[in-house]
Image: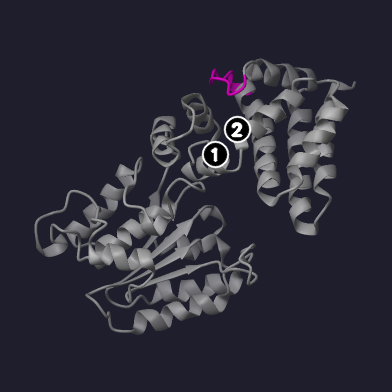
């Protein structure tokens, strides 16, 4: 389900309460920076706020009626329906568009012309009520010109205009953009929340797999659903099984694995994310003596054995090298199977003096 059409938001009650308090007190900031890791519900919160505001503050009346208990709007509400269908005249959404007619790949950034259109939109009289709302998802994806254009809008906000800026990496934004927004910092979801959501969205998934995917997803329901859809758990188990043969990897099994994973964009991206995450987790959990439960039996002992044998400094260098390799694969279309094989061989070399 897309953020636009999602009705519930779990795990972010504090951020929701902060916005609601600003709304009911009459001290609503004109711009909000909704921050946190990818896939944890930032865009869902932005749309939830937009629906609430454009519905006049919920069914309780908002500023001029009874104080609402939350930001929820019924899916049957006309505002909810129009926003879900993309037809609300007082909401503008700025996001990356498709790079081709086949809708296979998104553009790498949001064009500056799309950002400049925000000013024209906000200058119009609201068509359906007292507010005009803009969602930028995500503000990190603006180029320098786009960032300067959004900054100009933030410096001179029209009356009854609300800007909701989604950010995965707020530290990369212009300080002047950050300083002109009120922040809502969302934290990764708990495993319990992820399990609840996975049961809802993947009702046929085996319960053991639900628990394992929730553990792998690192607090991101977006990542959890992607792992479930792309066969990520089976891929992870195969990957850990290959690593388990260290220090002498099974070359035949490695090439078979590489042939399978290199075939599709989704499987390769899933693998690169899981492999990089496994290396990072091995370093951090070994250093902290973290007792988190295994997804694959024995992997905690495997991590500790590899890191202790190689040394933490050499381990981190391999993590950096493989991340660079995965990035190059996307940037210059390197042979994916070769990238996969080289990533495992970099691990194997750690076993050499």
Residue in the picture at 73% in, 43% down: 323
Residue in the picture at 27% in, 80% down: 127
| Residue 259 image position (x, y, % from top left) | 80, 41
Give the numbered dot on residue 233: 2
Q: Mark 1 highlights which residue?
A: 228
Give the Cα distance between marks 1 and 2.
7 Å
Q: Compared to 264, does 285 lie above or below?
A: above
- The image quadrant of residue 164 is bottom left
Q: Is residue 352 left or right of residue 5?
A: right
Dominant SS of magenta comes to loop
Q: Nearer the viewer, residue 348 or 179?
A: 348
Q: Nearer the viewer, residue 323 or 77?
A: 77
Q: Compared to 265, does 300 lie above or below?
A: above
From this viewpoint, is residue 15 visible?
Answer: yes
| Residue 253 image position (x, y, % from top left) | 82, 28
Instruction: Determine crowd level at label 1: few under 14, some 14-19, many 20+ residues with C-alpha closer than 10 A.
Output: some
Q: Are marks 1 and 2 in contact (CB under 8 Å)?
A: yes
| Residue 97 image position (x, y, % from top left) | 56, 69
Residue at disc 1, secondary structure:
helix
Q: Nearer the N terminus, badge 1 or badge 2? A: 1
Colouring convention used in this rendered image of the protein? one colour
Q: Residue furthest left?
A: 65
Q: Quadrant of the C terminus?
A: top right
- Residue span colored magenta: 287-296
Q: Nearer the viewer, residue 256 or 185?
A: 256
Q: Is residue 353 left or right of residue 278?
A: right
Q: Is residue 84 left or right of residue 224?
A: left
Q: Nearer the viewer, residue 288 or 88?
A: 88
């Amino acid at each position: 389900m897309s953020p636009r059409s999602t009705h519930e938001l779990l795990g972010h009650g504090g951020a929701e309460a902060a916005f609601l308090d600003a709304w009911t007190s009459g001290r609503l900031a004109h711009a909000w920076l909704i921050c946190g890791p990818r896939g944890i519900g930032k865009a869902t919160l932005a749309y939830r706020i937009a629906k609430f505001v454009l519905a006049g503050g919920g069914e309780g009346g908002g500023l001029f009626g009874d104080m609402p208990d939350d930001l929820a709007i019924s899916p049957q509400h006309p505002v909810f329906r129009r926003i879900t269908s993309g037809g609300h005249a007082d909401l503008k959404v700025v996001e990356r568009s498709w790079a081709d007619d086949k809708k296979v790949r998104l553009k790498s950034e949001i064009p500056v012309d799309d950002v400049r259109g925000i000013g024209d939109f906000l200058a119009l009289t609201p068509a359906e009520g007292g507010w005009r709302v803009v969602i930028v998802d995500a503000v990190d994806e603006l180029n320098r010109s786009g960032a300067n254009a959004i900054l100009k809008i933030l410096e001179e906000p029209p009356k009854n205009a609300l800007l909701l800026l989604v950010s995965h990496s707020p530290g990369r934004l212009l300080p002047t953009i950050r300083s002109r927004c009120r922040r809502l910092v969302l934290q990764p979801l708990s495993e319990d929340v992820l399990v609840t959501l996975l049961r809802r969205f993947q009702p046929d998934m085996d319960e053991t797999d639900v628990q394992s995917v929730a553990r792998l997803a690192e607090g991101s329901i977006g990542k959890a659903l992607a792992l479930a859809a792309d066969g990520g758990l089976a891929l992870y188990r195969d990957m850990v099984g290959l690593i388990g043969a260290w220090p002498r990897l099974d070359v035949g099994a490695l090439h078979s694995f590489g042939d399978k994973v290199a075939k599709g964009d989704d499987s390769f991206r899933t693998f690169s994310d899981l492999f990089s995450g496994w290396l990072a987790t091995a370093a951090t959990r070994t250093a902290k003596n973290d007792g988190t439960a295994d997804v694959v039996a024995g992997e905690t002992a495997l991590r500790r054995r590899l890191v202790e044998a190689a040394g933490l400094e050499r381990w981190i260098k391999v993590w950096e090298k493989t991340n660079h390799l995965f990035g190059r694969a996307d940037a210059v279309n390197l042979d994916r199977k070769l990238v996969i094989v080289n990533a495992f061989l970099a691990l194997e070399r750690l076993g050499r003096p």
